[in-house]
Image: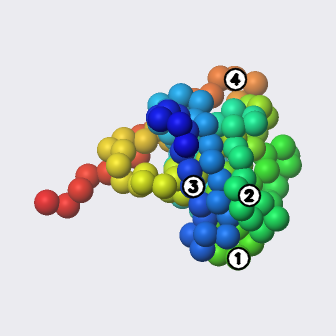
Amino acid sequence: MPDDANLRTGQCHCGAVRFEVRLSDGFNTIRRCNCSYCRMRGAIAVSVKMGGITFNQGEEALASYRFNTGSAQHFFCSRCGIYTHHQRRSNQKEFGVNLACLDGVSPFDFLEVPVMDGINHPNDTGGEARLAGTLRYIAAQ
């Protein structure tokens, strides 16, 4: 892989699904969401433009889930169940990729993660995307 900070490899927990992504803006797009699904899933996502994901192995092992309006498509490994990525509802030309699936990256590497207001999604309200809060990680001493 070329020396490019925006190029990352990743995989699901069992390794059946392996992929490479080109991040849209490094880790500057990390976020969580407080909608009903994301709240239960608990993952931190980072943005990748359409065409920015290449599957090196196991694309056929991916299953998907849609709910509510059905416009967002959430993908997960059908073997281990780990969410790998989703096509975003607010921007259908972008994917949110599970930060924890990226090799060498942990969600706990980030002291603060913005939480977007998915309960009042801009596609429902007609307004702008809003920040619901900030998730903070404070390591034990």
Q: Nearer the viewer, mark 4 or mark 1?
A: 1
Q: Residues within 10 Å of mark 2 (few under 14, many from 20)?
A: many
Give the residue at x 82% y 55%. Answer: 66
Q: Residues within 10 Å of mark 4 (few under 14, many from 20)?
A: few
Q: Amino acid at mark 1?
A: Arg
Q: Amino acid at mark 3?
A: Gly
Give the residue at x 53% y 37%. Answer: 2
Q: Nearer the viewer, mark 2 or mark 4?
A: 2
Q: Position of 70 compared to 76: left or right?
A: right
**Of all residues shown, which one is farthest toward the bottom?**
79
Q: Nearer the viewer, mark 2 or mark 1?
A: 1
Q: CA distance from mark 2 to mark 3?
A: 14 Å
Residue 79: give its label. Answer: 1
Question: Does 61 sit above or below residue 111?
Answer: below
Q: Amino acid at mark 4?
A: Gly
Q: In the rendered structure, which disc, 4 or 1, sits on the residue that comes first in sequence?
A: 1
Q: Amino acid at mark 2?
A: Phe
Foreground residue, 32 or 75? 75
Which residue corresponds to mark 4? 127
Looking at the rendered structure, the secondary structure element under dot 2 is: strand
